[in-house]
Image (cartoon, rainbow, N blue to C red):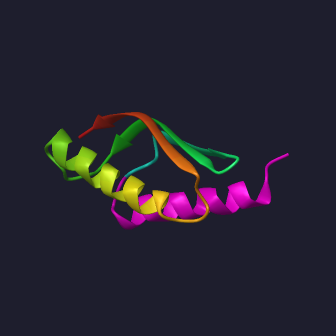
Amino acid sequence: MANVEDNRALKVARSAFSKHGIDMGRAELRVTRGVLHVGGVIQISGRKDRESLKHEVETVVRSLRLLKEFTEVVVAATYST
């Protein structure tokens, strides 16, 4: 059974990525015991270069690491433009 805190943290993570316009439709977000795992394919519509996408994701990850819901954030995803 899923942990209530992990479910709440997952909603926080999805919200943070969507606020930055990052398409997580092909990505997989999973929270286990406070550790956020990001996998799959991450996209931003309208972006032409992969570096700006990667920078935007790193910005979101840094902000999520500061929140009490997460003990760690692991990104093992590919970037697509």
How would you classify the magenta stretch by its main secondary structure? Answer: helix
Answer with the quarter of the image where residue 30 lies. top right
Foreground pick, 44 / 33:
33
Q: Position of residue 42 (x, y in %)?
A: 37, 42
Q: Is residue 15 above or below residue 45?
A: below
Q: Please tell me which residue is depicted at 40% across the width and 53% down the height of the picture.
A: 61
78 drawn magenta = no
In this rendering, would 6 be left or right of 75? right
Q: Position of residue 75 (x, y in %)?
A: 44, 39
Q: Position of residue 41 (x, y in %)?
A: 40, 36
Q: Please tell me which residue is depicted at 46% across the width and 46% down the height of the picture.
A: 25
Q: What range of the chain is rendered magenta?
A: 1-22
Residue at the far left in the pictured view: 48
Answer with the quarter of the image where residue 78 lies. top left
In this rendering, would 66 be left or right of 32? left
Q: Quadrant of the N terminus?
A: top right
Foreground pick, 30 / 27:
30
8 drawn magenta = yes
Q: Is residue 19 above or below residue 50?
A: below
Q: Please tell me which residue is depicted at 54% across the width and 48% down the height of the picture.
A: 72
